[in-house]
Image (cartoon, grey):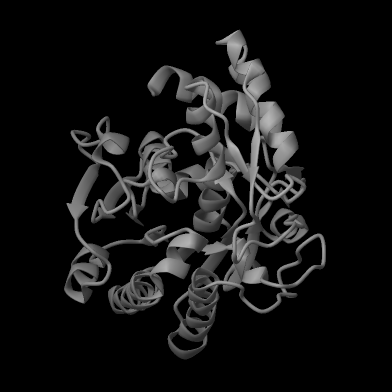
């Protein structure tokens, strides 16, 4: 967890959050404002929503900019006088990238490069970016350790790996300090349950609330290191404020260090939703084919983050699911 001294670093800083109206970005904006930072939020609202930041819009330390990271001039303007960048803007989803690899590349690679150049030119102290567990690709080693990856299995995974290569290159070439956070299946409040590329937890939650049968891809034994949003927020705050020089220009797994298969996950969702509506316990689960590009199992080692950043995940899967379902029940 962050110390009082680290909170002081954050509260005295101007921080840009790209993708700040999205699921993770909006949660980061809220926390940064709560701590006392001055926050710029950049989002083109392609997948983000103004409703995610509506409580912040009138705050004197918050500024929303409707803009696209694919436009270099926009990136230049928003990076002006910024101390730290939390780069969350991206087009997520393996299936989306398989359907439209060109747009995924434009946003996730060209947009990322625009932000790196703008951050370099503006003298940003640290560029902290959302990396992805998809970078581990076809490596079947568990747990996943940062310096051992396989070959990417989707265009999305390629774009996120290229981000890491660019970040490393910008440190070596220009001295821009970067920190990559490899997110593992993040879930929690404000995650959008709608749309063709909705993540599994909010999608299943909304279906169960409607007494519809969720469809598990495959037999349900595929497992993931589901990571609650508060753990992700903690990692971003530590990446901003860590005084450990050895933590800079590194990539860190951002996870819990535990895994849950889809059958277990679905039963957990039904358990907590049934507290609000007992009929949900009777909803049957369906099975469909495995999705192309999906890895069978994902489990992170978080030892590097603990050692270099002082990371201490606060929410295991049950804690996160309980909180997330409470939010969904009262907000959907």
Compared across the picture, whether 117 is left or right of 289 comes to left
Compared across the picture, whether 45 is left or right of 167 comes to left
**Towards the viewer: 218 or 145:** 218
Q: Is residue 109 visible?
A: yes
Which residue is found at the position 67% from the left and 32% from the top? Answer: 266
| Quadrant of the rendering where the C terminus is positioned | top left
Compared across the picture, whether 87 is left or right of 69 comes to right
In the rendering, at what x and y percent does residue 37 appear?
35, 44
In the rendering, at what x and y percent does residue 154 appear?
55, 72
**Towards the viewer: 38 or 196:** 196
In the current view of this chain or complex, which residue is farthest to the right? 142
**Towards the viewer: 272 or 229:** 272
Which residue is found at the position 56% from the left and 10% from the top? Answer: 277
Which residue is found at the position 47% from the left and 33% from the top? Answer: 189
In the image, residue 308 above or below residue 109 = above
In the rendering, at what x and y percent does residue 159 appear?
48, 74
In the rendering, at what x and y percent does residue 90 appear?
39, 62
């Amino acid at each position: 967890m962050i110390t009082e001294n680290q909170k002081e670093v954050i509260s005295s800083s101007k921080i840009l959050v790209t993708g700040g109206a999205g699921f993770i970005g909006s949660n980061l904006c809220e926390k940064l404002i709560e701590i006392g930072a001055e926050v710029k939020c950049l989002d083109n609202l392609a997948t983000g929503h103004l409703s995610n930041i509506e409580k912040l819009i009138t705050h004197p330390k918050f500024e929303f900019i409707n803009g696209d990271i694919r436009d270099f001039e926009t990136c230049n303007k928003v990076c002006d006088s910024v101390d730290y960048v939390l780069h969350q803007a991206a087009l997520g989803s393996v299936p989306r990238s398989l359907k439209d690899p060109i747009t995924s590349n434009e946003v996730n690679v060209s947009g990322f490069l625009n932000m790196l150049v703008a951050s370099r030119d503006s003298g940003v102290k640290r560029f902290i970016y959302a990396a992805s567990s998809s970078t581990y690709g076809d490596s079947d080693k568990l747990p996943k350790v940062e310096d051992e990856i396989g070959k990417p299995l989707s265009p999305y995974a390629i774009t996120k790996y290229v981000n890491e290569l660019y970040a490393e290159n910008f440190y070596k070439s220009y001295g821009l300090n970067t920190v990559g956070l490899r997110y593992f299946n993040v879930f929690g409040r404000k995650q959008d349950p709608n749309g063709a590329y909705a993540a599994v937890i909010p999608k299943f939650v909304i279906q169960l609330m409607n007494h519809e049968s969720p469809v598990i891809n495959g037999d349900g034994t595929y497992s993931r290191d589901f990571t609650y949003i508060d753990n992700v927020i903690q990692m971003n705050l530590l990446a901003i404020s860590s005084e450990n020089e050895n933590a800079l220009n590194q990539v860190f797994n951002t996870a819990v260090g535990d895994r849950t298969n889809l059958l277990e996950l679905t039963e957990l969702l039904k358990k907590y939703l049934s507290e609000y509506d007992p009929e949900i316990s009777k909803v049957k689960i369906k099975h469909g084919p495995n999705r192309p590009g999906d890895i069978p199992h994902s489990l992170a080692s978080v030892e590097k983050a603990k050692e270099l950043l002082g990371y201490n995940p606060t929410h295991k899967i049950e804690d996160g699911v309980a909180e997330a379902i409470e939010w969904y029940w009262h907000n959907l």
